[in-house]
Amino acid sequence: MNKNLRITVLSGVFCAMIFVLTMFVKFPVASGYVHFGDALIYICASVIGPWGIIAGAIGEGIADVAGGFAIYFPATVVVKALIAVPFAFFNFKNDKILNIKSSLFSLLSGVITVLGYFIADLIIDKTYAFVDIPGNIIQAVGSAVLFIIIAAAFDKAKIKSKLF
């Protein structure tokens, strides 16, 4: 299989996995739900680079629509694209998914998530802006921890080198 086709197929597979992890593995909080699909976005962007930005944004955006949170679709697409950027452009070229930089990127992406949804909530419904912060922090921290676990397992299994 040529490299372009492989990346296209992997993008679709990651998009679907991100959707499933976001839509079906979630925990309710005061103003919505917490999910750990972000961890898979970090993995995806680290493995397939810029295509991971698109796969993550679409996978989570569709999960918002399917889950009854369509009003958040535009914000989700922007926030999820932004959280993938450090991984897609600065971790993609590394042989390993998990390293000091990618660990720090997961923290940076968590900050982007909390701030991004705070701004979105200020626009959509100001009453949720502060109520959403604890859930978004839990999501960001949980996603960072899950990313580290999955990335370590993928690196041990040499998944990145086996895909390309």
Image (cartoon, helix red, strand yellow):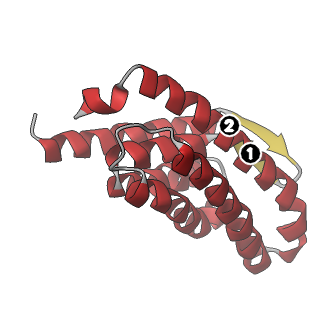
Quadrant in which residue 123 is drawn: bottom right
In the picture, which quadrant includes the N terminus?
top left
Q: CA distance from mark 2 to mark 1?
A: 6 Å
- Whether label 2 touches label 1, CB < 8 Å: yes
Which x, y percent locates residue 113?
67, 61
Instruction: Out of 154 and 116, give the one closest to the viewer.
Output: 154
For disc 1, the marked residue is 141
Instruction: Out of 153 and 10, give the one closest to the viewer.
Output: 153
Q: How many marks?
A: 2
Which x, y percent locates residue 103?
59, 46
Give, as a three-letter code, the residue at label 2.
Val
Up-down relation of residue 80 to residue 147 (above or below): below
Residue 140: tell me if it is visible: yes
Tag 2 secondary structure: helix
Q: Is residue 88 left or right of residue 123?
A: left
For disc 2, the marked residue is 145
Up-down relation of residue 164 to residue 140 (above or below): above
- Furthest toward the bottom, the residue is 123
Residue located 52% across and 40% down the image: 40
Q: Residues within 10 Å of mark 1 (few under 14, many from 20)?
A: some
Q: Which mark is residue 95?
A: none
Instruction: Out of 143 and 62, give the one closest to the viewer.
Output: 143
Give, as a three-letter code, the residue at label 1.
Val
In the picture, which quadrant includes the C terminus?
top left
Tag 1 secondary structure: helix
Residue 15: tell me if it is visible: no
